[in-house]
Structure formats: C-alpha cells, structure tokens
C-alpha cells in the first residue's frame, strides 16, 4: 500500500531503532480503540520503539526510543488513513494518486497528529498513542480530503405519484420502541399510487371474424378514433385541480410548493435515524442517502461544506441507547438496501417521501441531524 512521503522521511531517520508493536487487538494497552473509530470520529494508533544498545545515557535512550515509537505510529497512521473510504469506492489512497494538493494536506494532517498518551517502559522501550480526528476545524482528515462543490444543490422534491409512508409511533414513543416498530415494518411500507393510464382505442377483432361493417359504422369508428387521438395529444401530466384519490379513479397529482410540503409534515422531528442493520453498511466520510429510483435525497452537495468538515454528515452507531445527533424526537426509517460498495443506504420511495416532507418542516437534513444504525 502506498504511504505518503512524510512517513518515509520520518522513518528513515529512526527506522533502525523502531520495532513493531505487534498488536492486532481492537484496543491498545491504553484502552483506546485502534484504527478508525467511526462512533467517536477519530483514528487512533499506538507505536512502539526501543533505544539502541549503544545509547550513552538514560536521557539519550529515552529520546531515541520516543522517536522510534513516533515513527512506528506515523507509519501505522499512513496505512490506516490510506484505506479510509471517502465515498463509495473512493479511498484516501486513490485521492493521493490523483490530486497533489490532497497529498500535501494529508501529509500535513498526519504530521500534526496529536499525542494522547506516552509511556517509557521498564524494559527500555517506549509506547506512544496518537490520534487524528476524522472531522473538525483543526487538522482533521475531512479538511484534507473533502472537496468543495461548485454549487449548493437543493434537496429534491418528493415523488408526487407515491404517497408518503405512515409513521407507526407518536412523539411520546421512546426511541428504542420506534426503532423496533420500524424494523418490523409496521405502517412504514406506504402505498404506491399508479399513474393514470392513457386512453386506448377499443379492441376490434379481425375482419375474418366479423361481418363487414356498414359505411355508417366505419364513419362512426373513425370519429371515435379521431376523438381519442386528440385526447391523447392534449393530455396534461399535472392538473390544476387538487389531488384526490379513491378506490376507483385517481386524478394526476400536483407539484406543491415548499410551504405546501411543509404543511404535510406530522412529527416536528429533530433528526433522522436510518436503520441499516443486516445490510452490511460500510461507513464512509461522505455518505449519500438515495431512494429506490436512484435519486439522491441527502449528500454533501446539499450541505454547507464547512459544517460537514467540522461535524461530519452522520453518526454511525451500533446500539439504540445513544442516538447522538438525531435528538430526542427522531424520525426512524428502515433502509431497504445499500449501494455503491455498501456505503449508500437506499430508502423505499414512500419512506424517502416522508423524510423529504418532514425535512421541509424542521430542516434536520440541512442541520446534519442524521444517524445510521448498523451492525
């Protein structure tokens, strides 16, 4: 795996004194989570080194062992950061090979890694634990790799031919019960409203199977055919009358204004929880939520990029006890699949409609109040 130049420069000076820590456990001796911790949005490594046998005194031995441990930590940071996925198949390593400016920023970010713990071991070795934040104003990986969009894109409109899903809970329902109810699919499937069909010419059997029509019959059929053809040509996809649905007929839905969509909101929700359990969701720095039509309903191009760099676009959690940024009254929906290397949750159109309608009212997507529940 390619490692940025800063690591080779640092390691070259002290590599003779470095030894690998040899630990592959999820947590270090200092109880820090090793590797990428999406829950706490940090990357943590522990490096170890020993002093050379010819060190002249304790002070020199300690200093050389410390440099060796830091070189080991820088090397590990380079390996881990190279593999971090920014979006879908795009890793930091791929960005380094494409954009020189990104490589320079990433090298500076790793060089500025924070030492959060260091210990001089009794056997003469040295251990140092270092961290780089995934997000944040100062020296974060996001500030090095996330690109600014050319223009801010508005959130899309709901799919007007499809009714939004109903919500199987109230504002008084505890969050864990909301997640359980949504996971069972109660009330969340919604209902598809079929689009009106175009008028068609009545079926006429072949001449061989019927009597030859009279001249009056031929003229009448021609008049009916011309009328139907004119109706098809002048058909308007969106009528000006209010939308109505019943068991027998359906008038074509009307595109609504932002205020009208907001008036359809039900829950005054503080955030969004997308239940992705069982779908092998892979965390990324710039996730996208799409509907089953492939329309992006949430992505970094819809958002203030400075706020994305500062806070991240979503929390990734693996339990239902602490839903973080989703707040005390979150909307909960169940993803029906994942796309783009398992990084983008997919919502059924009724659920994506419900999310967009509620967002018109309380703007929780704009405020990055999104949580992904995964396992």
Image: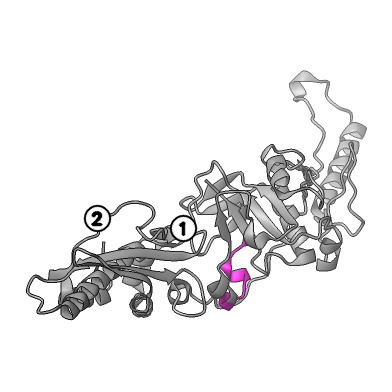
185 left or right of 262 in image: left
49 left or right of 255 in image: left
Q: Residue at x 85, y 57 (%)?
A: 264
Residue 289 in the image: state x and y as whole percent. 60, 57
**Label 2 environment density (alpha carbons within 10 Å; few <14, some 14–19, many ≥20):** few
Disc 2 is placed on an element classified as loop
State the residue in front, 112 or 127.
Answer: 127
Question: Residue 22 bears which disc, if any?
Answer: 2
**Which segment is the magenta one?**
298-306
Q: Residue at x 80, y 53 (%)?
A: 233
Nearer mark to the viewer, of 2 and 1: 2
State the residue in front, 284 or 329.
Answer: 329
Residue 302 is a magenta residue:
yes
Question: Residue 88 bears which disc, if any?
Answer: 1
Q: Residue at x 24, y 72 (%)?
A: 71
Residue 56 in the image: state x and y as whole percent. 9, 79
């Amino acid at each position: 795996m390619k490692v940025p130049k800063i690591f080779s420069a640092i390691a070259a000076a002290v590599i003779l004194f470095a030894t690998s820590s040899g630990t592959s456990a999820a947590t270090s001796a200092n109880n820090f989570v090793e590797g990428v911790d999406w829950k706490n949005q940090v990357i943590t490594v522990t490096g170890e080194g020993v002093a050379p046998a010819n060190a002249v005194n304790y002070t020199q031995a300690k200093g050389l062992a410390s440099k060796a441990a830091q070189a080991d930590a820088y090397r590990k940071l380079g390996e881990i950061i190279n593999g971090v996925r920014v979006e879908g198949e795009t890793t930091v390593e791929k960005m380094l090979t494409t954009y020189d400016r990104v490589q320079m920023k990433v090298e500076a970010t790793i060089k500025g890694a924070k030492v959060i713990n260091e210990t001089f071991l009794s056997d003469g070795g040295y251990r140092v634990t270092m961290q780089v934040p995934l997000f944040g104003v100062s020296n974060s990986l996001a500030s090095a790799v996330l690109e600014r969009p050319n223009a801010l894109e508005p959130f899309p409109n709901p799919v007007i031919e499809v009714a939004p899903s109903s919500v199987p809970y109230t504002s008084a329902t505890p969050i864990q019960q909301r997640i359980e109810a949504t996971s069972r699919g109660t009330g969340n499937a919604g209902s598809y409203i079929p689009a009106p069909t175009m008028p068609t010419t009545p079926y006429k059997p072949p001449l061989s199977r019927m009597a030859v029509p009279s001249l009056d019959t031929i003229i009448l059929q021609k008049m009916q055919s011309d009328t139907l053809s004119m109706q098809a040509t002048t058909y308007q996809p969106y009528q000006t009358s209010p939308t109505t649905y019943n068991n027998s007929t359906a008038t074509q839905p009307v595109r609504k204004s932002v205020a009208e969509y907001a008036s359809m909101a039900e829950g005054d929700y503080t955030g969004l929880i997308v239940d992705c359990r069982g779908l092998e969701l892979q965390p990324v720095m710039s996730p996208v939520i799409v509907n089953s039509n492939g329309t992006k309903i949430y992505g970094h191009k819809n958002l203030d990029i400075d706020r994305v760099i500062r806070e991240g676009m979503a929390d990734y959690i693996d339990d239902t006890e602490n839903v973080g940024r989703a707040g005390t009254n979150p909307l909960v929906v169940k993803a029906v699949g994942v796309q783009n290397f398992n990084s983008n949750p997919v919502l059924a159109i009724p659920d994506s409609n419900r999310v967009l309608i509620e967002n018109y009212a309380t703007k929780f997507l704009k405020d990055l109040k999104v949580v992904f529940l995964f396992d």
